[in-house]
Structure formats: C-alpha cells, structure tokens
Image (cartoon, grey):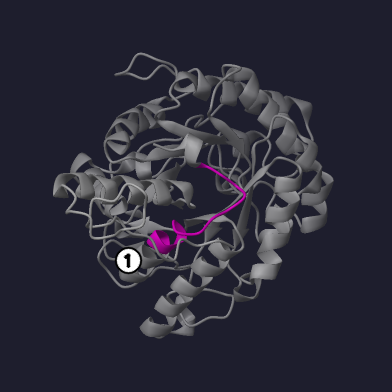
Amino acid sequence: MLVMQEWGACYFDSANNNCQQSGVLDQGTRGNNIKNWGKQIIDSGMPWMYCLYYAAGLKADTRKYLLQGLKDAGMSVLRVWLDGQGGSPKGTQIDGYGGLEPNNPGTFDDTVLERLDDFMIDAKEYGIKLMVSIHSFNSLSAGNDAYGKKWGTGYFYEKADAMSAFDNRIAHVLNHKHKTLGKAWKDLPEYIFAFEDQNEAMIGKGEAYVKAHQDWHCGRAKAIKANLPSDSPILSTTGGASWASESWMTNLLTCDALDIIALHAYGAGEFTVGNLKQYVDQATAKGKMVVMQEWGVCYHNASNQCHPSNGVADANTRAKNIEGWANTIAEAGMSWMYWQVIPNEDPHQDWDYEIGIGKAGWDAIKAAGNKARTYDSPVDFSPYLL
C-alpha cells in the first residue's frame, strides 16, 4: 500500500526542488502548480464510484443536484440499470419508466435508454461516466420482464435460446443511437466507462451453481466485445454476486473478453485487508481488474441481516464503519462503489444501506471517497476516467 503522505509547492522560486529562499515565485505559477500537481496525485489514486438503480427516472433538477453532490465528493463513475421503475424508490420522486424488454424477448421499449441519453450528457458535465448494467437478476427472479416471464431463474443460465436472447439485448443496447449525440453507445467512451452483463447473476442459486456456470459471464463478455470497436476503451465487467467469494470466479481470469471481475460484500467479516487483497493479487497476476462494485454499512443495528426490525444503529458507529471499511477496501488495492447514494433523506425501508446527500453518513462517505483517491493500487482505472 502506498499513500502520498506529504507533498507541497514551494513559495520560493526554486527550479531544483530545494526550496531555498532564492526569490519569491510568481503566485499565479505556484497556484497552478498546487492545482496541477494535486490533480496528478488524485488521478493516479483509486477512484470511488457508486450505484443508483433508478437513475433513469430522476427528474432533471434532481439529477443535477445529485451529480453536483457526487462531483463535490470526488466520485468518478455511476452504475445504472435498464430495468423498469415506478413509484418513489428510496423516497425519491421519479418519472416512472418501463424495462427495456417488458414483455417479449427482442421487443424493445427504448424509453430507459433515452432517459439515460439525457443522464449521461449531464453526468459528463460533472466529470462522471456511466457503468451500464445490461440486466438485473432482480427482474429475472421477480418475473416482471420478458426474461422473467419466459424463463424465470430455473434454466436461464443454461439454455441456448436464453443466452441468444440476452446477447441480442447486449447488441441492442450497445448499438442504441444516442438521441442527441447521434452516435451509438458503443462509440461513446467519453460517456460510458463499462458495460456490465447482469447485476448479481445467479444469486440465490447457491455458490456451487455460480461456480459451475461462471463461463456464462465469459460468453456475455464476448458478446459485449463483439459489439464494441476493436480499439474501444470501454470496459466489460461482471455484476457481482451475494458476497465476495461467490462473486470471485477463477475461470474468468483467463477470459480474454472480460476486463473487470466485480465483487459484492455486505458482511462485516469480509472487510479485512487480507481477505480482499487476495482477489487483487490474483486478478493483477492475470492482467485483470477487480472492483468492489457493491458494499454498504447498514442503517439498522444488525451484524448481517439489515432490517428495520433490528432497530437503528448508533450513528457514530455507522460513520466509523463507513470510513473504516472503505479504507480497508482501498488499502487492499481495490476501488469501490457504495450502495447507494441518493438525492434525498433516506426513508429507511427494508434493507437499508443508502446515504442521502447532506444527510446522516454523507460526511463519512465523502471523507472515505476522497481518502480512497490518495491510495495507490496495481489496478489503474485512470486511463478510462474523465
């Protein structure tokens, strides 16, 4: 682990870095040095990112409020979904929208893509790129979209027709022409950081099943790369699983089409440097990237099962855990994405890890995010960020 613990720009005009009293440096030059050198240090460190599954539904003013808060906190990437949402998820007032394939495989409703057309333009203005999750296991298991209705979770990851339909979905998304820019998403690396195959594929089917069918991810990564230009800097990634070891699939270390293996972790026992560093070491040894794509600290008093019935956790303890676990992830050499930052006060419903901008936990996650950017890592995302 490496951290830039001390650095500075000399007040005096000293070209050889000895900072002797040899005349006062022009203060405009010194100011530029402070700004530029600081930016270089930050850009060489680990970015922090976050998730918002209903981002496509945010109203324009809410979207800009959220993006400004995330920019102020130094966030680099936002992970978004293509599944339909309505109502007021997490207490956020949204414009509802349907999923990409609401009823039949291959019959598309592009509303969600067009909403994200608008979102990515605003996001770029705030220095933020998107990680686009092509689909979520949640929709599959709920049976409320084309895949859930036709296949459900039973043999979806084994049937050739299901894989073919999913690859067709990938092609549709990557070739969607941006309504304002006039380019396909596959040709927008300045807006899109990565395409993810599926959020938490196969969760609930057991770790043994996940391991037995991990090559499903490689197949989808191949479909993503087949639709990207050969020299595209847009990355391909998995979408994690229930916990870190279930998310980690060693076959994918030799999948040429896959760039990132994504981990998810919510149990306190997972957040040790030794536990997480093993994944960084294995990934980098094979030329792969790894990211903690989902993690969070429960609002409720629970060691594992995050539910309102357990009562509210002490706010100071939660803040300490947010900063502590974030630092542990960073010290292991891994960038992270928090679940989730929202633009409003969290109503604290059900499984509750969310943090509202300016609300309880916000100062802790901001501090953790900015500190993460001072750590070094063998996984360098800087060429792929704004």
**What amino acid is found at the position of numbered circle 1 in the picture?**
Asp
Measured as percent of width and height from the top left, residue 207 is found at 77, 57
Towards the viewer: 326 or 100: 326
Residue at the location (42% across, 46% down)? Answer: 43
Residue 215, magenta (yes or no) = no
Q: Considering the numbered disc 1 on the image, is that residue within a helix, a strand or a loop? A: loop
Residue lying at 80% horizontally and 48% vertically, measured from the top left? 250
Q: Is residue 204 visible?
A: no
- Residue 171, image x, y percentages: 57, 20
**Image point 71% across, 48% down: which residue?**
283
157 in relation to 72, above or below: above
x and y percentages locating residue 126 in the rendered image: 28, 41
Q: Is residue 169 left or right of residue 38?
A: right
Residues in magenta, as a range: 369-381
| Image quadrant in which the C terminus is located | top left
Q: For mark 1, what is the residue? A: 346
Find residue 286 and report its image quarter: top right
Q: Depth check: 249 or 146 in front?
A: 249
